[in-house]
Structure formats: structure tokens, C-alpha cells
Amino acid sequence: MNIAGRALVLRGDDVDTDRIMPARFLRSVSFDGLEQHVFEDDRKALAGAGRVHPFDRTENRAATVLLVNRNFGCGSSREHAPQGIVRWGITAIVGESFAEIFFANATALGVPCVTVSADDTQALMRAVETDLATAIEIDVSALEVRAGSIVARASMPASAREAFVSGTWDATALLTADYNVVRRAAARLPYIAGF
Amino acid sequence: MGSTLLQKVWDLHTVRRLPTGQTQLLIGLHLVHEVTSPQAFDMLRLRGQGVAMPERTFATVDHIVPTDGQLRPFLDDMAEQMTVALERNCREFGVPLFGLDSAEQGIVHVIGPELGLTQPGMTIACGDSHTSTHGALGAVAFGIGTSQVRDVLASQSLAMELLKVRRIDITGSRPPGVYAKDVILAIIQRLGVNGGVGFAYEFGGTVVDRMTMDERMTLCNMSIEGGARAGYVNPDETTIAYLRGRRFVPIGAAFERAAAWWRSIASDADTDYDDRLEINGATLAPMVTWGINPGQSLAVDGRVPREADVPAGDSAGVRDALEYMGFSAGAPIAGTRVDVAFIGSCTNGRLSDLREAARIVQGRKVARHVRGLVVPGSKSVAEAAEREGLPEIFRAAGFEWRAAGCSMCLAMNPDRLNGREVCASSSNRNFKGRQGSPTGRTLLMSPAMVAAAAVAGEVTDVRRMLPAGETR
């Protein structure tokens, strides 16, 4: 599985899902339209200070890869956060590390989150900031992220990599394939059998 | 070599190994609420699927419900719509619902243990990151997103990767005025907000052994704030005594068999852990957060850090936090003026939390510039508090007494901060904008510390307000 595209650099550690998608946008029974609200409060705050958030830069509008730092997506389990990012147009995320629930949510949406070293993250960010047209290529099979002369070793839990390579990242089909095995496992449990 | 509780529970719930290498893990209890489930039910409809085990699935409304004026239809049209959607989904798919018309409605992580739905040795999932709370009873419990809620609804299972286990011992004893909230804030402060990624936290040691179940829930609740998707305490006699007589717990001989099984799934004494941490309980003090994540905390008598005080990699985070909070590096945190005091949430909205806060406010008044809000975690908590006369104590002091819900923890309902207000809060997250105002500021602390701050009108050391000579 290969993903290639222009990248958007979002610097900062511990970017939480409340910032990615403030709770007031969870007030809906669907995910429709969430792309409009990604980082809304951060974007407004920066605009108020006369600065431009990476998600507001017109030259970033074509980006499909998101470059982040450490512990991206920490906090709430709200899938609204990756839903918003994906609906905005991002198809893969590269960073130093990811919070676990965010990673699982993104995986379920078919968006790989791959980890590269802090040094490589810096190098990739600098390359993109120097030349926005830099194409980032994420090779999930080979676990490599390439950009111009940079070749970064990437990592990802083996099962997630396998899920992307084999196209089985939507786990529902696997999990519902044979309900009898689930039923048998349940029957073995004392608390389900009634002690 | 023995096994951890996590490993035992994992093995017992393994359905099969998936082709990806992940485990198909049976989920013994699935808890559902109005905010993260509507899209999951819609996906089931779209795929023509039903709920695999509606009898292992329970729903309630908590996140968006108003805490004043709960007459239907709600004044808040979106709250009404989301509640109606959950009611319809539960009806259509046969899922039991503890709705607002039920005496057992409340925050999902408060009512699970309260009803005895949560039991040791279970796997529990819920579309909410604070599902880790249920680990207090010796369950393996974790938060999931909506696509995974769909998976559990459809298959009663999840595709999961085994977690490592970090054993965290809190040894010795706690000084007075130090609560479970202070213990977990201190742990996160030491290990960082991402220190737990890939781990489940197993809490133990004499301090934890002596904790009540409510306190253990506070501890496990915030595991996720340290990056650990699950946290747990091994079931012991405290756990078993707590469960006896609860609605969904077996009775008679079945209870004794259940208790024996619960004891058997605790981690073995000769277990090897992937990592360990030991903290001497005597070194702990009441904690307050000063920044924009739950790891940015300090003892109440401490000073807000300077960029130079932290490792180089963290200085940008400190700078960002100081700028957002408007705090001066090196300034004492005590004396910080607060505008709002919030007591409640799945972290600290249980009866014992309200009792501790009431003890502090009894006979005192909330400072004139402070808006104080007490939101019980469930209708049962509210009812028990009413029997003890706690609402009268809070009202007499100048607090508002509200109906059960998540309320100002995440401000999906009208309970929220305005502008740059500073809130002393017993909740779990101090992220930017968390409490409903994009510029609002949150200081996390124990309910007793919130009560003290409400009275003083500023952050203050609760130990000065405890009855003289008290030992806990």
C-alpha cells in the first residue's frame, strides 16, 4: 500500500481531540460537515492574532498527508476528530507518536498513522516548509516514508500494517464472519453462563 | 511464573486470532450513550445488521442532557434530537436503556459499577475514553470510537492488540487532604500524558489497597489521561463487599461462586510486569493543574514552572500553556483567582466525592465572585446525597445543585464557561476550550480542593480547611 501526496505540517506535541474537534460539534447524529470544523477554535484564535493556521493556508488545501509531532490525538475517544480530518482531505498521517484510541479510530477509517523518529519528523517538516510542493510518499508495505532525498524508517504495529496491506482495515467483516465462534467463547465465561 | 489479571482476562475472552495477527476479543459488557452511538446504529442499518448480544449491551443518556429543567422535549433542540435517536435505536435493536425516565440514569461510568453491571474479570467497551474507570473493579475496560462501537454492536467483539502491563505501587499511606485524584494527577505528572501508550496500568500498594471503590474509580478513570487505554485494580474483599447486593450481581450460592472466580482472576503474586513504578504515598500532596493537559500539574504549594525547569523537548508545550493560561512562570499556583467551581463528572461525581466537598463547605460561603455548580454523577448518587442532606449544605453555601449528567466536564449542554473564566474543576481534562469556552481555563483538582477554592475565591490548600487533628 502506497500513499503519496503533498503534506500539511502541524507542529506541536499532545494535540488533543478536543482541539481537533471541539465538543460542540459532537452535537449531531451524523459525521456530515465535520470537515468544516477541524481545529476550529485554534484557527479562530490564530486568525484573531493575525496569524494563519496550517488548515487555513490556501496553499495547503491540496495536502493529503498530515505531519505531526508527539502523542497526536490524545484525550477523548471521539471519532469525530479523525472523521473531520479525513473528510477535510487527509489520507495518511505521519508523526512521532499517536494516542492509542485515535490510532484505532483512524485505522478503522482506512487512514494509516505511521510513526517516524523525532529527527526524521523534523527533517520531513523542514522539507515541506521549505518547498510546499514536496511530495511525501508513505510506503506502508516497506514501512518507509520518502520525501525527496529523505528516506525515513517508519513503524506501525504489525497487525495494523497487515490490515492495510491486505485491505482488511475495516474489521467488521472479519469480526462478523463466524458468529458461532463468538457465541462459543461467550458460553465459556462464568459471568455469561450465570456462575 | 504467574499471570497478570490483564493476561488472564485476555486469554479468557480470546475468540480467535485474526489473519492480521490481532486478537478477536469478546466484549462482555458494552455500554452505550447518546453522543458516540447514533452513527454506529446507522451503519448497522445500512449494512442490514442487528445487535449481536443486546442482553450484554446497556445504554444511558449523560453527555448532552441538561442538568436543570429536564422536562421533555428539552429546550435544547439538539439534546432532544440526540436523546430521541438513542431511544429509537434502543427500541429498534432491543437494547435496554436507562433513560431520563429511569431512576438509574446517570453518567455511564457511574451507573455501570453502581448497578453491578461492571464486574471483575469482564471485558468492557464503551464509546468514551473514560471507560477505563470500570477497571477499578478488576475489569479490563477501554474506550473506543464509533466505528468500533459498530463492531461491538454487530459482533460483540473487537479486533485488538494485547497491551503491556505497568504495575504502579503507591506505598505507605496518604497524608490528610490527599485524595485519589491527587494520586492519579501525581502519577500522570511523573509518567507524562503519553507515558502509558501501549500499556494498561495496574494500580496497587497499600494506599490503593485501602482505597474505597469510589476512590479506585477516580484512579482508573484518569489512566487514559496518562495515555494508558486501560487501568485496573485487582479485585479484593473491598471489591466483593461493594458488589454484594447490587442489581445485576448474582445472589446466594451464585454470589459465592462469583466471588471465588473474581478472586482467581487477580494478578498472581509472582507475576513479572513489563514495567514498574513505585511512589511513596507519604510524599504526595494536594495537586492542581496549571497548564493545558493533565500532566501539567503541581502540588498546591508549588510554583508554575519556567521553560528552563523542563526538558528541552517540553519547553514549547510549557510556553504554549503559560500563554494560554495567562500565568507567570515561577508564580505560586495558590492564590490564583477562580470564577467557577465545578464538582461532578465521571472522575469525581460520586457520593463520597460530594461528601468530601460538603465537609469543606459546611458552614462556609462560596466567595461572592464564584459561580458554584454541583452535578451528581447519577440519579442514585443524587438520591443518596439528598438522604444525607448534602444538597442543603451546598445550597446554603451558595452552590447550585443540579441533575445528573456530564455537564461542565465537556460542556455539550448549556453548562459552560464564558470567555476566559477560570474554573476549579473536579473533572478530568484541562485541554484548551474543554469546558465550552474556546478561551476558558480549567484547573483540575480533587472535589475537596474545588470546594476550598470556591470558598476562598482562589486556589487554596484544602488541608487548612480540614477539621483540626484529622487523620484519614
Image (cartoon, rainbow, N blue to C red):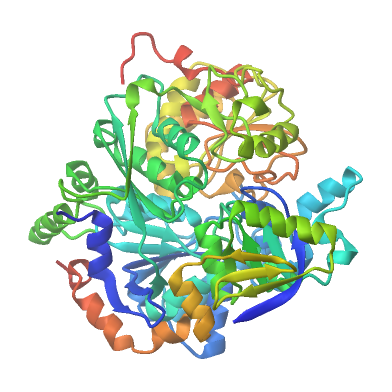
Please give the name of the residue rendered at 74% of the width and 29% of the height, measured from the top-left corner. Answer: B326
- The residue lying toward the viewer, choosing from A26 and B282, is B282
Q: Is residue B18 above or below residue A88?
A: below
Residue B331 picture location, percent across and down = 66, 18
Can you name the residue that lies furthest to the front here? A149
The mark total stands at 0
- In this rendering, would A90 be left or right of B363? right
Residue B90 placement (x, y as % from top left): 47, 74
Residue B418, quarter of picture: top right
Is residue B145 at all visible to an observer of this figure? no
Q: Position of residue A98 (x, y in %)?
A: 56, 58
Which residue ends up furthest to the top in the rendered image?
B468
In this picture, residue B388 sits left or right of residue A141 = left
* Image position of A124 (left or right of A111): right
Kindly indicate the quadrant of the structure image that contains residue A187. Answer: bottom left
Name the residue rendered at 51%, 61% in the picture.
A101
Task: Name the residue furthest left.
Answer: B253
- Is residue B49 at least partly visible in the picture? yes
Q: Residue at x 80, y 68 (%)?
A: A134
Between B269 and B64, the one lying in front of the other is B269
- The quadrant where residue B206 appears: top left
Where is residue B431? Give x, y as percent. 63, 44
Quadrant showing the N terminus of chain B: bottom left
Task: Identify the image quadrant of the C terminus of chain B.
Answer: top left
Vertical position of residue B402 compared to residue A190: above or below? above
Kindly identify the residue that appears in the image at 87 percent across and 60 percent down: A57
